[in-house]
Each structure stands twice: as structure tokens, then as C-alpha cells.
Image (tube, rainbow, N blue to C red):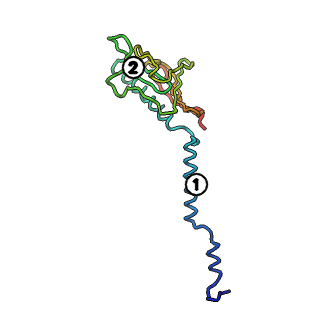
């Protein structure tokens, strides 16, 4: 075994210089790469369906179901007005003979979508042109595009929730009997 003048073997010094990375160093590098890839995938929407679109669709589904129950229990007719960037609710006032906004019910206040999300409404298979926002709607004589009647009937419609620049969308479809279904379209 070769030794130096001091009596120390050169093999241990050479072995320490050539030993490479520790397991801890490799794990730190892999964790950093994983975080960067995850952040990039989330920012690009590469992980499949869009949670914000799904949440907005589920919220609207819940509201339509709630309106249907309220209409049956209170024998009131409700309406829904859609814009590209949100939706609002109306109540038919039989004393005035017209649709009015519910001023005392916080649950039925207008709802604005999250930024970059948009709605597309289809009635009888045809797309309905929606106003950009509530400010451009007629506030004197509001008219709903969809009605939830006290008889349990709902105007059949399909509403698509989309994000600009993304082909994927969620569609909420309501049948005449109030049945609501949600589907995903064009997600990988």
C-alpha cells in the first residue's frame, strides 16, 4: 500500500475527491426540479380540467337546484339573466306584473365570474348573444333568458363556462323537468 512521506495513504484522499454527490444533495435537486415543473404545468393549465371553470359551473348548478326548490316551496317564479361575465336572478312580482331583482335576498345577488372566464348560452340548440356585462343590460324592464317556474318546470338551456385561450369548457344542461347535468368538453 503506497504511503506518503507523512505516512498517510493517498488512496483515501483520492477516494474523497472522486466520491460524487450525496443522496441528500440529489434529493434536493430532484425536489427543486419537481416544484418548477409543477408550477409550470399549473400556470399553463397542462394538468387537465380547469378548477375555476369547474367551481363556477358547480356553483351555477347549485343555484339552479336551489331556485327550483324555492320556486316549488314558495310558489314563486324565478328568472336568470346571463351576461358574458356573470349572471343574476330575478323574481316575478305579481302585484306589478313584471320581473324585478330580489333586493332583500343576498344569495340571489348578481354573480360575476372570475377574470378570464366567460359564459355562452344556448337555447333550443342556438347560441344566444349575451351582453358583455350587467351595465349594458336594460335595468328598467329586466327580462330573464331562463325561467324557473313554481310548477317545477325550467327553461331547457345549456350554458358553457369557458376560459379565453383554452379549448376546454364545462357545459351545464338543464331539462324541462329541472334535471341538471354537467359535462366536460375538450379536456385532455
**What quarter of the picture does the N terminus occupy?**
bottom right
Q: Which mark is residue 131?
A: none
Q: Quadrant of residue 15?
A: bottom right
Q: Is residue 177 visible?
A: no
Q: Position of residue 170 (x, y in %)?
A: 53, 31
Which residue matches tag 2?
Answer: 90
Q: Quadrant of residue 110?
A: top left
Which residue matches tag 1?
Answer: 33
Q: In percent of the image, x 46 and y 20: which residue is there?
A: 136
Location of residue 56 with respect to 131 vertically, above or below: below
**What quarter of the picture does the C terminus occupy?**
top right
**Residue placed most toward the observer, 173 or 164:** 164
Badge 1, how many Cα within 10 Å: few under 14, some, many 20+?
few
Q: In percent of the image, x 39 and y 20: which residue is there?
A: 90
Location of residue 172 with respect to 95 vertically, above or below: below
Q: Position of residue 181 (x, y in %)?
A: 50, 28
Amino acid at each position: 500500500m503506497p504511503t506518503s512521506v507523512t505516512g498517510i495513504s493517498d488512496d483515501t484522499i483520492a477516494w474523497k475527491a472522486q466520491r460524487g454527490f450525496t443522496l441528500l444533495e440529489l434529493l434536493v435537486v430532484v425536489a427543486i426540479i419537481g416544484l418548477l415543473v409543477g408550477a409550470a404545468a399549473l400556470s399553463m393549465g397542462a394538468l387537465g380540467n380547469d378548477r375555476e371553470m369547474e367551481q363556477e359551473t358547480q356553483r351555477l348548478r347549485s343555484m339552479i337546484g336551489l331556485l327550483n326548490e324555492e320556486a316549488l316551496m314558495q310558489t314563486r317564479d324565478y328568472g336568470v339573466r346571463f351576461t358574458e361575465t356573470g349572471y343574476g336572478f330575478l323574481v316575478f312580482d305579481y302585484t306589478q306584473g313584471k320581473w324585478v331583482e330580489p333586493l332583500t335576498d343576498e344569495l340571489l345577488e348578481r354573480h360575476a365570474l372570475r377574470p378570464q372566464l366567460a359564459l355562452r348560452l344556448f337555447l333550443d340548440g342556438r347560441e344566444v348573444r349575451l351582453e358583455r356585462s350587467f351595465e349594458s343590460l336594460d335595468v328598467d324592464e329586466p327580462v330573464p333568458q331562463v325561467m324557473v317556474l313554481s310548477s317545477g318546470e325550467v327553461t331547457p338551456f345549456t350554458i358553457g363556462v369557458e376560459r379565453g385561450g383554452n379549448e376546454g369548457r364545462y357545459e351545464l344542461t338543464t331539462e324541462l323537468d329541472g334535471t341538471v347535468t354537467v359535462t366536460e368538453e375538450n379536456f385532455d
